[in-house]
Image (cartoon, rainbow, N blue to C red):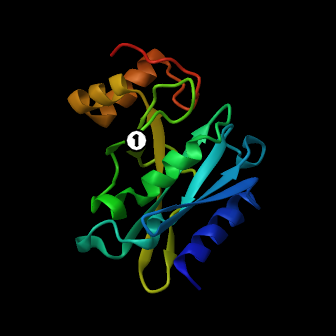
Amino acid sequence: MELRDAVRRHYRSKWGEPARQAEFRVAGLLAEILKWDASVTGEGVTLYTTVGASDRPIDADRADHRIEFFVGLRPERDEIASALAALALYPARENATVSHGHTIPSDAPFWKGTSMRHFLVLRPLQRIIEPFQFGEGIHVEFLQAIPIFESESSYKVKHGSAGLLDLWKERQVRFWDPERRAEPA
């Protein structure tokens, strides 16, 4: 069994069949995005997940450690799929490492009517999907990708991801809401 098949099966074991699926090809690389409606996730949000980021190790020193990404939004915003696929392919295309606390920019806003164009990548505060082992020692972890504004990205640079999370908690920011407005930092 291929690692991609194992990732798909892992998602399906948690939420059943996805409501939608899409494939994105860039420079010979393939990422898939799977969607589960809020009514089946148990999280109160629609979840969009990647398949394909785990094709490559996080870095040469950790060949056994792989990642996939997910985004939770309410209300749903299917336009996020393209940017999420680009995130999944980012390490291979840019020869870069993506891990907890990283901020990854996008070429364009995530959907019409927003200026959000960065992902904040985090280990979720509450585990949404369990990591799993594949074959002889490959470990797959699921990181949350949160759409953020330029001002939030700048705040994170100055105060770290924990500082941004504290600010959101203090201001009761609903970071899963794609219709939220940028707040001055």
Q: In this rendering, would 127 be left or right of 93?
A: right
Q: Residue furthest front?
A: 27
Q: Nearer the viewer, residue 143 or 152?
A: 152
User: Can residue 129 be seen here?
Assistant: no
The answer to which image quadrant residue 101 occupies is top left
| 179, above or below 176, in the image | above
Q: Residue at x 45, y 57 (%)?
A: 88
| 152, above or below 41, in the image | above
Sort mark 1 into few (<14), some (14-19) or many (20+) by Cα contacts within 10 Å: some
Image x and y of residue 71, in percent: 55, 45
Q: Residue at x 43, y 34 (%)?
A: 117
Q: In this rendering, would 24 be left or right of 115?
A: right
User: Can residue 112 be seen here?
Assistant: yes
Image x and y of residue 154, in percent: 28, 27
* Residue holding disc 1: 106
- Quadrant of the image for the C terminus? top left
The answer to which image quadrant residue 45 occupies is top right
Tag 1: residue type?
Ser
Image x and y of residue 149, in percent: 41, 27
| 156, above or below 16, in the image | above
- Quadrant of the image for the N terminus? bottom right
Q: Residue at x 47, y 36 (%)?
A: 147
